[in-house]
Amino acid sequence: MKLATYNILKGGSQRVHWVRMVEDFGVDLLLVQESYPHHEHLPPLMYPDAGGRCAWEMVEQNRWGSAVYSRTGSVKPVPVPGFTGWVVGAEISRASWQAGVADPLLVFSVHAPSRKESYQRQVNKLLDEIGKIARGREVVIGGDFNLTVSHWPGPERPTGKQDLAIQARLAEEFGLLNCWQAANPDQPLCQTLRWTNDRSIPYHCDGLFDLPRERWARS
C-alpha cells in the first residue's frame, strides 16, 4: 500500500497533481489540501468511478478545500464539525489494500487553519473533533499541520514544546506512527514548506500518521 499527502497550493493551477500521484507514483490512498474538487483533476473518462472514491469539501470563501481519495474501494464522507474544508474525513471500505481488514478505516486529510490564534491551538481542536468521531476506531491522519510534525534534535530549528506535545498526542492518544520518521530514522528533517525561498532551514510541517504494521495485521 502507498499513501501520500500533498498540499497542492491554491487549488492546483495545472490540474496535474492527482493524476501524477496516482499514475506515476502508484499512490493508493491520497490526502490532498488546497485542492479543487476531484473532477477538475481526474479526467472522467479515465476515472469514471472517482466520485464514489473521493470525499472533498470546500473551505469557506475559497474554491479549494481538502480531500481524501482511494484508488479502489468505496469512500463515505465523514463531516468534521467546525473544520469544513480544512479537515475532511472519510470512511473507506473494500479497498484492495484493505485485504484481510474487517472494519472500514477512518482517514482524515488535515489543513490546519490559523483563525487568529496559534496553529497549535487549532491542531489540538481538530484532533479533539477527530477523537470524538473515531471513538477508539482505527484512523489515518495526514496533511499540512502548519507546525513541526517530526522531531530532530538539531539546532537549526528547535522543535517547540507545543509541537512535541502534538506529536506525542498523535502517537499516544491515536496510536499512530509518524511515517516519514519511520522511513527515515535518524535523519535530519526535510523542508516541506514550499513557499519559502530559504531552503537551508528545514520546516517539516506536512506529515502522515498511519497504523503500525502489527495493528494493520489484527484490524
Image: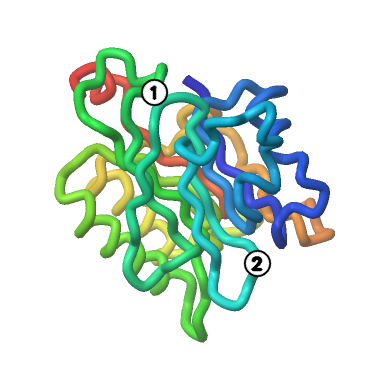
Please report whichever mark, 2 or 1, sits nearer to the chain's N-terminal start.
2
State the image quarter where residue 122 is shown.
Answer: bottom left
Q: Which residue is mark 2?
A: 63
Q: Secondary structure at mark 1?
A: loop
Q: Could you tell me which residue is drawn at 54 percent across and 69 percent down? A: 59
Residue 76 visible to an observer of this rendering: yes
Residue 197's place in the image compared with 23, above or below, is below
From the top left corner, tell me how far across and down residue 173 is, in percent. Answer: 22, 49
In the drawing, what numbered circle is on residue 95? 1
Report the disc number at residue 22.
Answer: none
Residue sitting farthest toward the top: 100
Residue that lies at the very extreme toward the left in this rendered image:
136
Q: Horizontal and vertical percent for residue 73?
A: 40, 26
Instruction: Give the percent coordinates (x, y) of residue 184.
Output: 55, 29
Q: Position of residue 196 (x, y in %)?
A: 78, 61
Residue visible at 64% across and 51% down in the picture:
7
Seen in the image, is 219 located left or right of residue 194?
A: left
Q: Which kind of residue does numbered mark 2 sit on?
A: Arg
* Residue sitting nearer the eye, 9 or 199: 9
Amino acid tagged 1? Ala
Quarter placement of the C terminus: top left
Give the side of residue 35 with respect to residue 80, left or right.
Answer: right
- Secondary structure of the residue carrying tag 2 is loop
Q: Residue at x 41, y 17 (%)?
A: 96
Q: At 30% from the left edge and 44% from the top edge, which residue is drawn? A: 171
